[in-house]
């Protein structure tokens, strides 16, 4: 699918994602003239709003969530917006929506609603002729709570849209440094020969957050950290690190390689997983309550998970992938660490050799650093003194004229333009769920329950022990 959409239909247009991310992203794309002047945006939701009221809602969202210098001509952007009230569970109303959306050709649809509404929405769209050949549909997570429910959603969508017109969002794929990981691996010769078990000791992926439950009490308590963060974002990061070089940067070539990795994930053993739940503590200098206090009751839901994963193929045999993520941790940081092995023989007997380490910072710092041994300047009578020094290989300064983008900018533009490369294919999502279900089955069978940790810490001490047992320290 290559034709550009002329209309973007936004379901859940008055929701939180729309306010914080989608409308600001669309306005930023507009300001940079990245979308066609003819693109119309039709919002829909349950509330009764006129076009004008929706535009006012959008204006407030932009003023709050998009820096002034990125807004361009806001009035022109707001003129692109239209609104149609709709209860997606009743067939009435879809025809009016279709009239507002215009002909079903070149239509991009974005569902930012609860997954329980996907099925009636798809039926309504199909019934109103909005699922024709020129229409593509994008789905926001959560895409299920396990493999079975995810298959149900996928089946429902597949009744009206073929796979090449389904765009499953994982917003981490829209992040600049995540895409840069592909550039680093496949636009440079030097890493690929070393990118294997012979030279890599282990990989760490950390997605640490300082926020707590925010306003998502019910959703989060049903999901937990494993399903909220590992099933999607972290497994996508792992797949990008571990995949074989694709033959081209095209949707199926990239996704064919990622899915092989996801299918090669070995089920974890009970000793390879630690879960946690935060208690009160200090986060970002503020005293914050524990998860149970925020929830108002006891719960077994994990707000932290650390895992040791293995990719069972030739390239990664014997290389553990340590993953950890959690809420109310010490700092907000997402990074991937590729820890190389030591040189096979040191010719510097007086030096403490440290193996090379590649640190791929995804947020808040977007940076790539390679730690290398180097000589400390000076005359060393006792033998050469060496030290590990970071070499910035993608300094933010090098691109200081480029502003930070919202991940959804890239993804919305690709949806409008019909490029699926940064979207997740059905077989990937299902392979992800398959592995996640096996992790949950292990912890249910072994009676693993969350260990407590103080808000503002790095999680339960058992997570530190999980790595230390192998002589590995989490990168902090
Ligand atoms: C979402 C999760 O997918 O990602 C949230 O549901 C989490 O719980 C968020 O806070 C993190 O995204 P980011 O882009 O802030 O790292």
Image: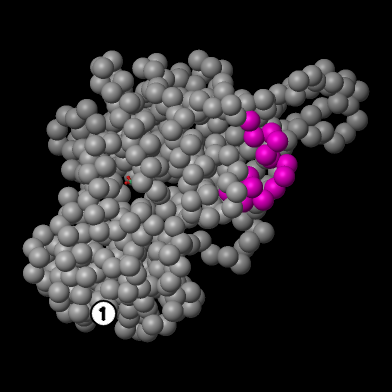
Give the quadrant of the N terminus.
bottom left
The quadrant holding residue 210 is: top left
Disc 1 designates what residue?
102
Q: Relative to 45, is 371 above or below?
A: above
Residue located 30% across and 30% down the image:
437
Residue 366 visible in this rendered orientation of the protein: no
Residue located 25% across and 76% down the image:
101
Q: Relative to 476, is 471 above or below?
A: above
Q: Secondary structure at mark 1?
A: loop
The answer to whether residue 38 is magenta is no
Q: Relative to 296, is 34 above or below?
A: below
The image shows residue 432 at horizontal and vertical percentages of 37, 37
The answer to whether residue 189 is magenta is yes
Residue located 88% across and 20% down the image:
382
Residue 94 visible in this rendered orientation of the protein: yes
The image shows residue 400 at horizontal and vertical percentages of 62, 63
Colour setting: one colour
The quadrant holding residue 462 is: top left
Q: Give whichever of 71, 238 is nearer the camera.
A: 238
Q: Position of 335 compared to 164: left or right?
A: right
Q: Give whichever of 400, 103 is nearer the camera.
A: 103
Q: Under 8 Å from ligand 1: the CB of mark 1?
A: no
Range of residues picked out in magenta:
182-196
Q: Label 1: few (<14), some or many (≥20) within 10 Å?
A: some
Q: Relative to 351, is 32 above or below?
A: below
The image shows residue 282 at horizontal and vertical percentages of 35, 37
Number of callouts: 1
The quadrant holding residue 228 is: top left
Residue located 68% across and 40% down the image:
191
The image shows residue 32 at horizontal and vertical percentages of 49, 75
């Amino acid at each position: 699918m290559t034709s550009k959409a002329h209309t973007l239909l936004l379901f859940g247009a008055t929701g939180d994602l729309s306010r914080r991310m989608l409308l600001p992203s669309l306005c930023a794309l507009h300001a940079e003239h990245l979308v066609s002047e003819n693109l119309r945006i039709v919002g829909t939701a349950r509330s009764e709003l006129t076009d004008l009221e929706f535009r006012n809602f959008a204006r407030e969202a932009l003023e709050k969530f998009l820096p002034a210098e990125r807004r361009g001509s806001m009035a022109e952007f707001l003129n692109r917006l239209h609104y149609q009230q709709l209860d997606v569970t009743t067939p009435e109303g879809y025809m009016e929506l279709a009239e507002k959306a215009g002909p079903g050709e070149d239509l991009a649809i974005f569902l930012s609603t609860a997954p329980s509404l996907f099925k009636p929405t798809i039926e309504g769209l199909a019934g109103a002729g909005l699922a024709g050949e020129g229409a593509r549909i994008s789905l926001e997570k959560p895409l299920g709570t396990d493999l079975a429910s995810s298959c149900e959603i996928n089946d429902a969508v597949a009744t009206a849209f073929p796979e090449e017109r389904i765009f499953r969002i994982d917003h981490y794929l829209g992040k600049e440094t995540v895409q840069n990981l592909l550039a680093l691996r496949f636009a440079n010769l030097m890493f690929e020969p070393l990118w294997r078990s012979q030279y890599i000791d282990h990989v760490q992926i950390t997605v640490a957050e300082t926020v707590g439950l925010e306003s998502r009490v019910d959703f989060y308590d049903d999901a937990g950290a494993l399903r909220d963060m590992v099933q999607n974002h972290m497994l996508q990061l792992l797949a990008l690190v571990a995949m074989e070089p694709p033959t081209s940067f095209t949707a199926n070539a990239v996704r064919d390689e990622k899915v092989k990795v996801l299918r090669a994930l070995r089920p974890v053993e009970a000793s390879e997983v630690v879960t946690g739940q935060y208690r009160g503590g200090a986060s970002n200098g503020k005293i914050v309550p524990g998860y149970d206090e925020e929830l108002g009751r006891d719960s077994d839901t994990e707000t932290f998970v650390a895992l040791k994963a293995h990719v069972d193929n030739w390239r990664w045999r014997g290389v553990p992938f340590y993953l950890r993520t959690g809420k109310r941790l010490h700092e907000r940081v997402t990074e991937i660490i590729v820890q190389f092995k030591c040189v096979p023989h040191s010719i510097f007997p007086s030096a403490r050799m440290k193996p090379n380490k590649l640190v791929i910072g995804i947020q808040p710092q977007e940076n790539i650093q390679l730690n290398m041994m180097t000589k400390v300047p000076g005359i060393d009578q006792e033998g050469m003194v060496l030290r590990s020094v970071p070499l910035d290989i993608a300094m933010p300064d090098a691109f200081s004229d480029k502003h930070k983008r919202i991940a959804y900018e890239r993804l919305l533009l690709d949806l409008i333009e019909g490029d699926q490369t940064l979207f997740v294919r059905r077989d990937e999502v299902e392979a992800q769920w398959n592995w996640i279900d096996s992790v949950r089955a292990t912890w249910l069978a072994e009676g693993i329950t969350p260990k407590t940790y103080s808000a503002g810490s790095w999680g339960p001490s058992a997570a530190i022990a999980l790595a230390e047992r192998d002589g590995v320290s989490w990168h902090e």
